[in-house]
Amino acid sequence: MNRIQGLDSIRFICALFVLFGHLGVINKNTFYFLPTNISHYLSAAIGLIFNGPAAVVVFFVISGFCIHFSFVKTQTINIPKYYFRRLIRIGLPAITAAAFFIFFHNPKNVWTDTVLWSVTCEVIYYLLYPLLLVVRFHIGMLYMILISYVISILVLLLNIDMVYAANNSYVALGKHTWIIGLPCWLMGCYLAETYHRFKILTTYNIWKIRILIVFIVFLLRILKFHSTYIVASNAFSLNLFAVIVFFWLGFEIMYLSNKKLFKPLEWAGSWSYSLYLIHPLTISILGYAGIESLGIGTETDRIFHILSAFLLAYIFFILIESPAHKLAINISNKRFINIIGR
């Protein structure tokens, strides 16, 4: 098995959670036909389901899985080829998106004040991976995960004030967020070594797990906003959630390995990275073009913004991400790269 099917579909669904979390999918007037109190609570509950930070943790686990899956059997790595392929693949779209963020939003720090914080974390993990691979073969992946969790917790406990000041955000530590997210990424690496141990569940049972995952991310969102305990902050709770994601994805991978996939979802997953990068800029880009609103109504505008995000993301994929992917492959396959990697 050279490629794990179904992961692109999961990526796209997670990108939708981030998209809906940022752009919104409903508001308090959506259920206007219901009594006011019911409409308010129902709208709030549905909105809490779209837990973007939890979706990013799933991205981290999948990312670690995909990277380690390529090397877990060979136990060798051509470092120059690896760096060229991974960093160009993820870096060029990210740098382009950063330029867009600067032009449209001018954030104080483009890498920590936008969705690019997670890309920054992944780049650091990619850079560290060859070293982590060496350490893994000396102490094992489980010990690495345990050590990374201990370090993550210690760093958070030493910076409690920053976590509270950031309203329990996962990115409370700013540029040091990669330390917090590393255990999640390593959980993905461990999954690449162990996914074949999971049983193939029935459709009924896999859907029970999927519903449970949605319910958990809903509860984590409530805890983040309504609990004063520091362990309820995203920086703590989502790292624990990564353990649950590990088991969910293990069952999901085995289940999907024997199923006919929904091709449109897999296709959409192939450009989910572009959707993740570009969707926060949708309203700004539309406003710059003079069409921020259709002027019909808030619900219509929300649908318009979401559809526009899909369109802009796909254009970005065609013009930026896909060429970057091809360039990464072409450069990494150059003869001089293979020579210096020996």
Image: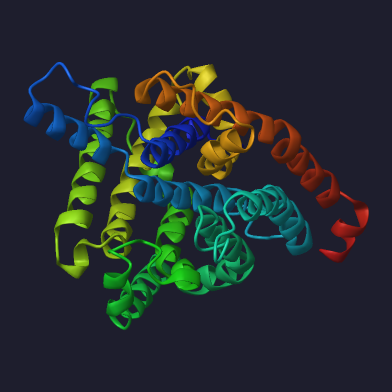
- Among the 4 quarters of the image, the one containing residue 286: top right
Report the front residue among 84 and 27: 27
Residue drawn at point x = 62 percent, y = 38 percent? 288
Q: Nearer the viewer, residue 225 or 135?
A: 225
Q: Quadrant of the N terminus?
A: top right
Question: Is there any visible trace of residue 271 in the rendered image?
Answer: no
In the image, taking residue 296 as reference, residue 93 lies left or right, namely right
Tell me which corner region of the image, top left, top right, bottom left or bottom right, holds residue 123.
bottom right
Which colour assignment does the render follow? rainbow
Q: Which residue sits at x=31%, y=83%?
A: 158
Residue 277, given in percent of the width and then of the height, sits at: 57, 44
- At 78% from the left and 62% from the top, the residue drawn is 80
Query: Which part of the image, by quadrant, shows the C terminus?
Result: bottom right
Residue positioned 57% across, 28% down in the render: 291
Q: Is residue 114 above or below residue 311?
A: below
Left-right relation of 91 to 212: right
Across and down, in percent, residue 179 comes to 45, 71
